[in-house]
Image: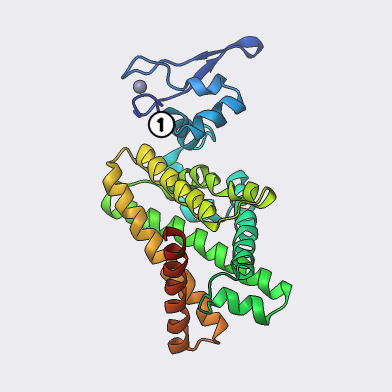
Amino acid sequence: MLCIQCAKPADSLYVEYSHGHIKLTDCAFCQQTVDKYVEFDGVLIFIDLLLLKPECYRHLVYNSFGINDNRIKKDWLGNIFHWDYLTRLWALLVAFEIYLAWAAIEQEQSQTYIQLPMTAAQYILHNLGPVQQYLFFAFQCTLDVLLLEFLTYWLINIFVNQVSFQIISRTILLAHGARLFPVLMLIWPYDSSLSVSAVQWAAGLYVVEAIRIVTNNSPLKIGLICAVVTIVKWVIVRYTMALFVTNFNWYQSVTFLVNEYRCLYIVLLYHLT
Ligand SMILES: [Zn+2]
């Protein structure tokens, strides 16, 4: 655990007295309260999370689960696959992502104003049943999230500083929640897929800012790392899905990948003109 004001290590967040009374600890470095969020209501914490308050992120990532960072470093693999509170949250987030990805492709198909090249997802939608379609998007979203976590963790540790996998995973999870706003757009539909893309871009910026807060590094460096992760992830996920669709035909899969790129370009051009 650490002080949410100056990010220096702290021994405790509070001292507990009899009858459940607690006294918040003061930081030995900055003399301020180590973690004032200990006494905050969940709603207030959520609002500060949306407002990207650095202290709130530090509280949730480093202090709220009461897990010592050094212990995680020793057994990070076990912590990833342990079915804890965070893993359940990730599973819920991925379930929403699957629904959104599926709905987005179906919406794209129903918009007849532009002719789009055939992509792996559209091929699945045309040729397979609902169960296979669900499995397709489930695999795609799971791979997407795993690559996001591992690539970010890997690049941050190489180019920024040593941070445990669990810390990166928690940070992305907290910031990634913004990606669920398009669920509301499906309930109250907007006419343009551009609004969904805008929310996804905003969610991306949330991730950049959250990682910057937690790693205490320059926004440019973190932004570049996140941009690299996004591009590499996009290529790997799309190519892997194309491989499944084409029965591991390497050449045909490249054609599907090029079609994905052309789709992005056509949709972007359509909305900008
Ligand atoms: Zn401090």
Tell me if I can see residue 56 in this picture: yes
Q: At 49% across and 52% down in the image, what residue appears?
A: 200
Vertical side of 29 occupied by 270: above or below: below
Amino acid carrying label 1: it is Pro
Horizontal side of 59 relative to 30 (left or right) equals right
Eyeballing the image, is 133 above or below 4? below
Residue 88 shows in the view: no
Q: Nearer the viewer, residue 19 or 203?
A: 203
Count of numbered badges drawn on the protein: 1
State the residue in front, 263 or 53.
Answer: 263
Residue 80 placement (x, y as % from top left)? 53, 54
Q: Kindly tell me whether mark 1's CB lies below 8 Å from ligand 1.
A: no
**Which residue is drawn at the image coordinates 54% and 86% (left, top)?**
246
Instruction: Tell me if 257 is positioned left or right of 82 in this view.
Output: left
Q: Would you place residue 45 above or below residue 217 in this image?
A: above
Label 1 residue SS: helix
Dot 1 alpha-carbon crowd within 10 angstroms: few under 14, some 14 to 19, many 20 or more: some
Tell me the quarter of the image containing the N terminus. Answer: top left
Residue at which label 1 appears? 54
**Image quadrant assignment for residue 106:** bottom right
Q: Residue at x 46, y 73 (%)?
A: 260
Residue 213 in the figure: left or right of residue 106: left
Q: In the figure, 51 relative to 141: above or below?
A: above
Q: Percent position (x, y) of residue 96?
A: 63, 54
